[in-house]
Each structure stands twice: as C-alpha cells, then as structure tokens.
Amino acid sequence: MIRALSDDDRGLVARFARERWGSEVVVSRGRLHRMAELPGFVATGDGGRIAGLVTYLIEVDICELVSLDAVDEGRGVGTQLLELAVEAAQAAGCGQVQLITTNDNMRALRFYQRRGFRLAALHAGAIEQSRALKPEIPEVGSHGIPLRDELLLVRDIG
C-alpha cells in the first residue's frame, strides 16, 4: 500500500532514515533537509513496515526529489513512489523535477535515466561542503569510489 505521508508518520520516517541512511538529515546543494519534515509518500508492507519512501521539496516551480529508497529493489516500489512525487509536483505547478546524487551512485544514475531524467550539471568537489554540514558522510562510497562530486539530474514535466 502506498499513501501520502502524514504528521503521524514523522517518527516512523525519522527511524527509517536513521536505519537506512545513517541520519535523519540529507544534504544537497549545500542545504540540510530533514526527511521527516518533508512531504512525500510511503509504501508499507507486512506489519506496517516501510517498504519504500520518497520525500521531496517544492519551491516555486521546481520540485527537488530529496530522497527515494525502496527496501526491496527490483519490485517497482521505487518507480511507483517516484511517479507519485512527479504527479504531486505537476499538481503543484512545477515544470521540472530535480535531484542530486553522488558520483559513486551508479545504481541511481541508471535508475533515474531510465525514468526520463537527464544529467544536467556536475558540481565538482561539492561533497566537501556537504561534509561541513553532515560530517558522517564517508570519504569513500559505493564500489570503492571516493565521494567528491554531486550530480544534478532533471526531468521536465511541464
């Protein structure tokens, strides 16, 4: 079952973020975001456990996808959550959905590009700024790749 996040979900989202992301805080483009304070959608599975979560932030006519996490990948939960966030952005009058990922996140690059996103910018060295806000960001990411850069992906929806 997938539904919009409610105020009653905030504690659940905070715990999920700590367990899956190591922190309730996400940093992108030099800004801190608290996942539990953002709008989004949650997919729940057996016993009410979170099977997936998407959070986003709408500013003027751009929607930033702040987080997307499907516990069991390859079952379509991430795609469904992503499309619900896109629909919410369209309903709010946004013309574009943007997101930031890191230079090591090959799975995310594949996932988003297959769903209509394109690479729009490289923010070389941006992870150092992010570490100033969130020191727990590791030096090395997936596949032993040093974490250094943010990649901006965009999808036009308007």
Image (cartoon, rainbow, N blue to C red):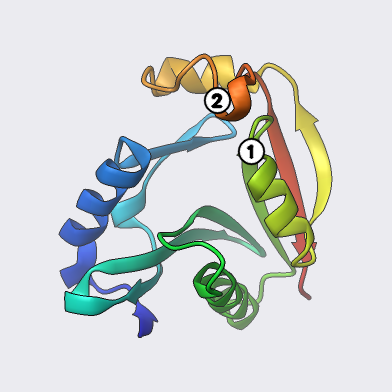
Residue 155 point in image, percent of width and height: 77, 62
Residue under pointer 2: 141
Nearest the eye: 156 or 145: 145
Regarding mark 1 in the picture, which secondary structure is present there?
loop
Nearest the eye: 58 or 17: 17
- Report whether 88 appears left or right of 50: right
Amino acid type at mark 2: Gly
Amino acid type at mark 1: Asn
Q: Is residue 84 above or below residue 135?
A: below
Residue 23, located in which quarter of the rendered image?
top left
Q: CA distance from mark 1 to mark 2?
A: 8 Å
Quarter of the C terminus within the rendering: bottom right
- Report whether 56 appears left or right of 63: left
Residue under pointer 1: 105
Regarding mark 2 in the picture, which secondary structure is present there?
loop
Nearest the eye: 92 or 6: 6
**Residue at 74% over, 49% down:** 153
Residue 75 point in image, percent of width and height: 53, 73
Q: Are marks 1 and 2 in contact (CB under 8 Å)?
A: yes
Residue 82 point in image, percent of width and height: 57, 69
Residue 120, located in which quarter of the rendered image?
top right
**Residue at 56% over, 75% down:** 76
